[in-house]
Image: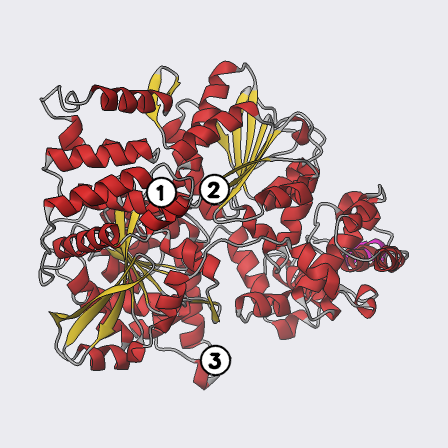
Amino acid sequence: MEQFNKIYTNQSLNSVIEKQVINLLSKKIDAVSTIDTDFNEIRKAVWLASILAESENEQHLKKVQDLAILLFLNNQNDLEVLKVAYILFSRIGNLTATNHLKNLVNTEDKNTFFEDIILIQELIEKRFENSILINEKSYLLTDFQKNLFEKIKEEKYISISAPTSSGKSFILKKYIEEELKRNEKYYVFYIVPSRALINQVSEELRVDIPNITIKNAFIENEIIENDKLIYVITPERAVKIINSNHGLTLPNLIFIDEIQNVENEDGRGNLFEYVYEELATVDKSKIIIAGPFISNSDEIFKELFNKTSKIVNTDLSPVFQLRTIINLDSDSVSLKLFVNNSITYELDNIIKIDKIEKTFDSNIGNGLSKIILALSNKNESSLIYASRGDYAEKWALRYSETITIEDDLEDDLQDLIKYVKTDIHPKYFLISCLEKRIAFHHSSLSEFVRKEIETLFEMGIIKTLFCTSTLLEGVNLPADNLFVIKPEKNKEELSDFEFGNLIGRAGRIKSTLFGTIYCVSKQNNTQWAEDYYQASYTKEVKTSSSRALPEIKGEDIVKSSIQIESPKVKNIITSLRNKALKNDGSLETFIAKHNLDEQKKERLINSVKNSIKEVTIPYEVVKRNPTIDPLLQDELYKKVVSDIDNWVIHTNSNFNVPYRREVAETIEYKSNSFFWQLDSIILRLNEIFEITSEIWKKESISISASGMCINAMNWMQGKSIGELIANRIKYYSEDERVKPERRIDANNPEHINKEMLLK
């Protein structure tokens, strides 16, 4: 190990890597001059790297990989250098990268490596060792992928920690493909944390596995005609499976991606735990969990499933990242290069931009537009991270104003533009962005538009995408360039783990093997970038229940969830009450596995059981809504049972008659129109569950109970998003009930687009 450490810090090796980084940057920025590297320097660096490749330390292997990628990128027509790159890739087990060495692989010289018989034997053996055959097609894998494939075939329970770009999902899909062919019946539950990932994973599976049936929801009592089926679902959609006697008998394989989401403290983390604990009862199922940079994946597996898993992990990403920090001078841009875990080069005033510092500091959107233009080219894809949705929109719009498109737009892009114009609004700012192959992406966009934008960006049709954490938490969209201005989410700084996950988007293994990250801030306040670059992105994942249980106070347990301030405490108490109502020992089992003293465990169990003594609602009803406090569900249940006529909709002569609230208040409930009966029910539900308050706390969206009723009516009538927006604009521009300070101009694009954010 000491020998490897000495090589890792060797000045000759590091110097060659640093020079190669400068030369790579010179291919992107004309003003950067190349640095000549003596051939003997390269030979020595390669010799050192070939020794370092024998290390088991992934940091050591990453340095070897960095050198191999840089040599390849800077010398794509030099067969001798490509040979060296191939050897280094082979020795660190990254055989997939050799697919990029097309000038070497496609050469007519069949004796490319024949000058060294021993070397030929080594390379052939490694290539054979890292190949698999699925349905008569051969695939070349990295060491990590080969190890994962073997473990999935051998083991029943597996916990994976690996970066997004490591290729773990590719291996999983190949395993599923093989099992589908081998078995007459085979069912998969592929669980992802978001609807966006449902779309992406489903599309990828349809492409990779021909003639497979994929479903995105479980329907009770549905006749399943296909004996080979993949459910791609969120944990919320898995609740229906858990509540079904038939559903839990199905899965041969349960795969759970992004397992770190069990940390979520807004209620989803507790739901995830509940779902996974119930799925653990399926004895026949192979269970695999996965997430990036997790130090304790096996412990999380044990806590959730009460089973021991085999660990397969790596922190090694197969792409090289060119990490930079931008400094702005009065009329120019300087770059700091972060190489070998430190700032090793400072390139002063390499790009001239008139008044860039003043422009950026006074208006980020205007300054950022000039920076993106200077640091990216038309063939590259760029992601720009914004901490808020309105920032993403404003910056995208400013950038679009600087772009000129001379060629015709692709048909798919024209179709999306037409849809946005006709089905959303003709003055939506997104249109003028799309017309320049630019888009923005945030949670207020419709799901369909978000999905189309993601697809077009992945296809390379949309070139520049301004996005928020919605993308970070959703699909994996790699890009050539990533610009980070303010690393925040919900007004809080990104954690090291989140930043590592974000910059993992820089670099496309399928095409270029590298990506560039640019960090920039007002007043050149970029110390945060250096801190993030030097940080460890690995973390210990703790379930939301593990974090919340020690914070429960005695007085909290007697309260309903709406009376408890702390979100994580109210959510864990809801979960505990659900387990107590189940009355099968699951409460005691759950408490026992957490690190609490015995007296506190006993007090907690007794207090939770006492809190549900007056609950009469059947557990079969409660379990269908595991994130809603059973005390509140019971309150609704008792009100419905005691006065059921006032909780159902009645048809009558006024049923479809439109009239205002002052009229509705003079008519008894049963005789009111459908709208006002529904409004009454929603108002009373809101009194019990405080729905509008929760929406405000979680999403910062202000909406009344009656506003929810209007939205529900529009949804039931099948109105399009465009109709909803048009009605909203009409209301705020024309209705006399709108206060003057809230009124908008229906012809003002700024006013119109503000209403489209719906926040």
**What number is the disc on residue 61?**
1
Residue at figure coordinates x 78%, y 65% from the top left: 560
- Tell me how the rendering is colored: secondary structure
Q: Which residue is mark 3?
A: 736
**What number is the disc on residue 198?**
2
Residue at figure coordinates x 16%, y 20% from the top left: 114
Q: Up-down: is 359 above or below 382?
A: below
**Mark 3, mark 1: which one is toward the viewer?**
1
Which SS does the magenta portion mostly show? Answer: helix
Q: Up-down: is 387 above or below 380?
A: below
Quadrant housing residue 605: bottom right
Q: Is residue 368 visible?
A: yes
Direction from residue 462 to residue 404 in the image, left or right: left
- Residue 180 is covered by the magenta coloring: no
Whether pointer 3 and pointer 1 mark residues with C-beta atoms closer than 8 Å, the reply is no
Direction from residue 537 to residue 668 in the image, left or right: right
Among numbered discs 3 and 1, the one appearing first in the sequence = 1
Distance from the alpha carbon under mark 2 to that under mark 1: 34 Å
Residue type pointed to by label 2? Ile
Q: Give, as a single range, the part of the protein colored magenta.
A: 641-646
Distance from the alpha carbon under mark 3 to that under mark 1: 69 Å
